[in-house]
Amino acid sequence: MERTVGKAERKDGECCHMTSGIGLGDNGGMTIATPERYAQMLDAARRGGYAYPAINVTSTQTLNAALQGFAEAESDGIIQVSVGGAAYFSGQRVNDRVTGSLAFAAFAHEVAAKYPNITIALHTDHCAKQYLDEWVRPLLDHEVEQVKHGQEPTFQSHMWDGSTVPLGENLDIAEELLDKSQAAHTVLEIEIGAVGGEEDGHSAKINDKLYSTPAQGIAVAQRLGLGERGRYMAAFTFGNVHGAYKPGVVKLRPELLDEIQTTVALAIKAGEMPAPAHSLDVAPGKPFALVFHGGSGSAPEEIAQAVSYGVVKMNIDTDTQYAFSRAVAGHMFSNYDSVLKIDGEVGNKKLYDPRSWGREAESAMAARVVEACKQLGSAGRALN
């Protein structure tokens, strides 16, 4: 059954179920992007030939680490929650994706205001078909109501992951969500093809299905347009795999992205499909704003090649998870006789205080975010 957001808490004339006085969704003077600012970010990346790291977070600590990293890199960026991350954000007893998503966004809006020199977009990541009615559709409905009442949407973009359904059904749902995204003043992200490995319980085998085709690019452009029906990003797959793998396991073919872009651009030039002038002016020959999933362990030259073909957003999760947890493990191993009560001793409260190892973990994760910004070319290019 489709869920509504905060309906029982909404009085006549009100649209937002948040009760905080921070003005969530207003974005006045805040670092969280407005729809117009997000469009500027994406256009700047397309024109400049760089991409934004999209950092998955699961807690206020990892969110703070992402913000710290973007600030240190002087980079705008994207911070996102997955289906599991959103549920985790709400707490084990609550375990609700919408509640967790709104809690994440509320915290982000409040804390990001202290980072005035960067702009951050909030995004929901990898929503498969079985989660649409209990996660992304309610959030979009909530944001449509916000817009109707003169507010900015809580999130700036949402991903529909149709990689497990036939292409026709994938695009049917994408059309519906694109219309709703247009009304919500948000950007839609779609996935065409399957990403291998596992992400939050969703898995795909490593095989030929990991490679999208130019024909699929044509189908997407024909069904969704190229911006005239609403702005969207497309994650075409080129051998991407979620998770951590040894070198040689993942066979990336970034040149597929170039083939897809070129095929659609030639179809436009031949008059086989219309394209808004804006899309062509922003990135000539690259009609799609592309997304790179499952890039952990990719060679630097593969990442650079993908970005050169029009990638504007690269998801980063596994590497930042490891950076955070490695710092925690290092603290615990180095201070094991202080963080544990051994042989009748009482340990050292300063060292098992979560703030002591938490700061180390946040700094380590922030450093990995800085590295990603430098690698993708967004460092030092904040729009503010």
Image (cartoon, grey):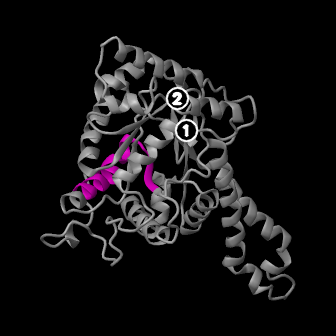
| Residue corresponding to mark 2 | 237
Which residue sits at x=16%, y=73%?
11
| Residue corresponding to mark 1 | 293
Q: Say above or below: 108 vs 227.
A: below
Residue 311: mark: none
Amino acid of disc 2: Thr
Amino acid of disc 1: His
* Residue 136: % across, % down: 34, 50
Q: Say above or below: 157 vs 32.
A: above
Q: Secondary structure at mark 1?
A: loop
Which residue sits at x=62%, y=38%?
295
368 or 323: nearer the viewer: 368
Would residue 169 be counted in the magenta stretch? no
- Quadrant in the picture for residue 69: bottom right
Callout 1 environment at 10 Å: few (<14), some (14 to 19), or many (20+)?
Answer: many
Residue 92 seen from this side: no
Mark 2 near mark 1, Cβ–Cβ under 8 Å?
Answer: yes
220 or 119: nearer the viewer: 119
Which residue sits at x=35%, y=60%?
154
Q: Say above or below: 175 vs 91.
A: above
Q: Say above or below: 167 vs 102.
A: above
* Residue 73: % across, % down: 63, 56
* Residue 206: % across, % down: 60, 28
Q: Magenta residues?
A: 121-144
Report how far apart the C-alphas of labels 2 and 1 lie in the structure.
8 Å
In the rendered structure, the answer to whether residue 178 lies left or right of residue 375 reads left
* Residue 308: % across, % down: 58, 30
Would residue 141 be counted in the magenta stretch? yes
* Secondary structure predominantly adopted by residues drawn in magenta: helix
First-in-chain label (2 vs 1): 2
